[in-house]
Image (tube, coloured by chain):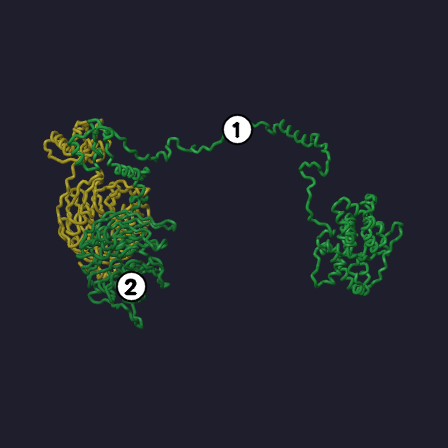
Amino acid sequence: MRPTHSGTMSKLKNKKRNLEENEDEQLPIFDKDGGKDGHLDDGDEDQGDLSDSEESVFSGLEESGSDSDDEEEEEEDGSEEKSSDVEEDKAADGDGDDQLSAKEVIEPQTDGQHSKEKKKKKKAAGKEGGEESVASDRDSGLQISSQVDEYEHDTSDEEDIRNTVGNIPMEWYKDYPHIGYDLEGKKIFKPIRNKDELDEFLDKMENPDYWRTVQDKMTGADIRLSDEQVDLVHRLQQGKFGDVNFNEYEPAIDFFSNEVMIHPVTNRPQDKRSFIPSLIEKEKVGKLVHAIKMGWIKPHRPKETTPQYYDLWAKEDPNSILGRHKMHIPAPKMKLPGHEESYNPPPEYLMSEEERLAWEQQDPEYRKLSFLPQKLACLRAVPAYSRFIHERFERCLDLYLCPRQRKMRVNVNPEDLIPKLPKPKDLQPFPTTQSLVYRGHSSLVRSISISPSGQWLVSGSDDCTVRFWEVSTARCLKTVEVGGAVKGVAWNPNLSICLVAVSYDDTVVLLNPGLGDRLVCTATDQLISSYEEPEEVKDQPVQWAVAEGEGHEQGHRLILKHPKAVRQVTWHGKGDYLACVIPDNGSSLQVVIHQVSKRRTQNPFRKNKGLVQCVSFHPIRPYFFVATQRYVRVYNLIKQELTKKLMANCKWISSMAIHPGGDNVICGSYDCRLAWFDLDLSTKPYKVLRQHKKALRSVAYHRHYPLFVSGSDDGNVIVCHGMVYNDLLQNPLIVPVKVLKGHTITHDLGVLDVTFHPTQPWVFSSGADGTVRLFT
Amino acid sequence: MSQVQARFFTENKKYLIDDVPFSIPAASEVADLSGVINKLLEAKNDGHKHVEFDFLVRGQFLRTSLASHMEKENISTEEVVEIEYVEKFTAPQPEECIMHDDWISSVEADSEWILTGSYDKTARIWSMEGKAVMTVAGHTDVVKDVAWMKRGENLQTGSLVVNDWNSERNKVEARHCCRGHAGSVDTVAVDPTRTKFCSGSWDKMLKIWSAVPTVEEDEIEEPNRPRKKQKTEQMGLTRTPLMTFSGHNEAVSSVLWVDAEELCSASWDHTIRLWDAETGEQKSTLTGSKVFNSISYSPLCRRLASGSTDRHVRLWDPRSKDGSLVLLSLTSHNGWVTAVRWSPSHEHQLVSGSLDNVVKLWDTRSCKAPLYDLAAHEDKVLCVDWTENGKAIFVIILTCLDLKLNYHYPYV
């Protein structure tokens, strides 16, 4: 029956689709169930539509050729009966709803009989055809009451006896005119199908029952499904129970509960198995016994009777007293009353007249007793205690002010607090003693500078002279007079040029000292004289002039007239550029840079912030350091921008020196501080040294040795070891190593300038006492 | 322990005494011992005059009491102590004072003449009596070092002009101007064969020049030319160096000939280097810790003495291969030691001058303290020298800066 069903269903579906395509009333379950069939059908039908009409005639049979149909059929074999049962139930119920419902509820057992009976009837009626079977089904509702042996015809393996071919794929018969054999062995012929496409179509259009007509595969006959059957199909598709009257939500009655009832539903005696020992258990016990015999299981493991505790103090040092015990301080106790407090003290406790006077004279704080012992005749005569409030107050004070905690005295070796610095002895060489004194100046020597070879020293003094000294003997080789107190001298760092820049008043003079290799001196002179005037003369803030006459003989070569007094001169490392500081607050012209070879002057800054104290060129890179009162600004000369601004953290910077590596700067200030900046680290000082007692006047770095030096108004020169590591992770090591004394303080001024020898660890200092000193 | 068994001996035949051990008080000092010896000698020969003696115990001069000296030197007092006695060097006395106009940078004494170089750009020749014989004005710059080439004939000065000086004619003549150095020439030294000389300069180079006079210079004889430049222009005798040694990293401060083949130079780069004068190879390097100002070599004891910019005079063995062996360090100065000079006749004696205005006479046998301090100067000492005849009188010539003095210390 089922195959027919699927066939019919697919047909049905197709028809439905055709009819109700727009209504979206598709039945997904139906699709799923017979999806494959449906599709095949569709395909066949489409094909059929396109090709010949012959095929379409057998389309109902042909579709079962697929494997899925086979399976379906096999599978359906068992369910065939059931489904047919359901169908018939349906059909029956359709009529006899009322009669059946009560019966079914009360006697579920009989339902089976009922259906079987119906089935039998149906099967008997099966041969007459679909219509008849339905009709008989209708009748069967009435025959229920009649008693029939319910097992008589109930054979589960009953086959469809109308066709004896058995359970075979029906397409095997597709090429034959018959479809199988009946019980007598006669061929069952396929019903004549001479409908062509047109007939089919017309049938479809005209026959109102076309959509409910399905073909029985076994017989090949068309069966028109009754309304009940269609309804059943719909219900099944919707996932409902086939029986309309079946209430799936009936209240459950717990017939077989654990409670012992007086009248149980079944009064079955207990099983025998509950009285005989279980073999399975015996087997399990046997296994355990075996395991115990073999020693795999230890039956009597001795229980650990001692309880396990965590020993909190196991790791405690037994010798140490617990901290809280050690720290415990009992509250102060009041002194117990003694004999003197008694109302009747022994006479030795009573004070004599002198003692009493002495007691009264004494300061209350220092009295041994706070009261006078009194002798009273009896206890009743004891007056009210006058000091009660006072005594309670003192007691409260005692309790309140008593120490609650024992103060742990931290035993710190004061030497441990001092940072571990290497001993100065290990940091040698550095200058330690005064070796030579260069005497000759009659006034304070403001500035000194050493030749790049280290053979000569130049010093400029307030006595309007510049002196050239031989370093090794302190011999003054040359004295050049200039027109004013010399504020700054600077020896050209280029070895192939012999020039010294001297600043006094508003003038900077370039001197050729004529020392050293004569070739170099003459070459320098030639370099200066070979200058050619450019064609268009620019307006320059500084006047350049060539020295002539007496000045030339003294060594003057070029004279630069500035608008205001020049304080400092410094050369660029290459020796062509010369920077001058013209301190003048608010002026835009505080720093000028001269190019000697082109005799050109430029004012690098449009506006200067603050009073410029000193300037310096970076030893390697095109940077320019400008120190104002509180800040050091680092400019990039190529990009013409401010690169960094160092906060000196002091009131007034006096001097500045750049480390030959170029990444460290020291600044001396008038408020006795020396600030070391690590340019890679921060714009704040890496370290500030306050070693001098008075204002610092000058600082300097050594070119090779890790040394720097500072000179101060207190007449001391302090040499420090300042190691800068190539490793970026390691901060500079700064160790003060030596205080060099020697200069006498004149007019409250001590050391005015310091400089290092270019190759030796020697330091020169010039002082207000008119001397230059060499410390080695 | 109050008595010590001592046996006296001497090399000097004149003061020989009997070779018997004496028991002398342990607390006795040099004067006591000297009295003992004098008494013994008086007993031996009548015509003996009192002589001061100095005493050496195991090669070290006795300066304290005998007991403390023996304790310090770890000499057992149980045995007989061998004490050598020598005639005491009397303290040198200033004998002559030569006034100079300016600082004297260098001095070299001959048996007859004294040659000085000065910061007034001249070199002068003085007789032993202190008379100015000749002024050699030819330099354009400070004369830093002078050296005799041939006795009485040639002299050579630090700015590398070789002058010819004839003592008979009292004329001086610039022979050569040796050009080649790029820095100031600080030191010159003539080799023992008197055919070459070496110069050291601030330009870190050592150069060897020929000292053999060329023939054709006799054509013009104009004594006392005021300017060297004129001379060189007229004569056109510019010498070029035979050989150049480079190796020092700093200025060369002192150079000398160890022998005819070996050259020794001291430099500001803290090294003393020994060179092979023939090949120009560097033989060995002695490394110090301070700048060397001056070195001196004694062929008698084959030691090198160096004065550096600390307070020490150091003695080196130039033959040692390991290079940096300081045999002895003589410490008594308070300033840079600017000049050292071994005695040409006495193997133990050297003299050193320092910037602390003191010249010290040392004996290597008493390295703790100098024999004598010659503190007659009032300013820095830049150079010292001995006269060449080591026989009767040794003269230490010192230069002084401010007073422009030359002292002769006669020394018997």
Question: What is the CA distance from the residue labelled 2 to the residue labelled 1?
Answer: 94 Å
Amino acid type indicated by mark 2: Val
Residue denoted by label 1: A304
User: Which dot marks residue A591?
Assistant: 2
Q: Which quadrant of the structure image shows residue A645?
A: bottom left
Q: Which residues are magenta?
A: A576-581
- Circle 1: residue type: Glu
Give the structural element (helix, strand or loop) at label 1. loop
State yes or no: residue B9 in magenta: no
Query: In this view of the protein, can residue B207 be seen by the observer?
Result: no
Horizontally, residue A661 falls left or right of residue B315, namely right
- Image quadrant holding the C terminus of chain B, namely top left
- Tell which chain the image draws in yellow: B
How far across and how far down the image is residue B286, in percent? 30, 45
**Are marks 2 and 1 in one subunit?**
yes
Residue toward you, A436 or A766: A766
Chain (green): A
Nearer the observer, A546 or B258? A546
- Picture quadrant of residue A260: top right
Chain of the residue on which disc 1 is drawn: A
The residue positioned 29% from the left and 64% from the top of the image is: A592
> Quarter of the image holding residue A546?
bottom left
Question: Mark 2 falls on what kind of element?
Answer: strand
Q: Is residue A102 left or right of residue A471?
A: right
Q: Upstream in the sequence, badge 2 or badge 1?
A: 1
Which is more toward the observer, A166 or B251? A166
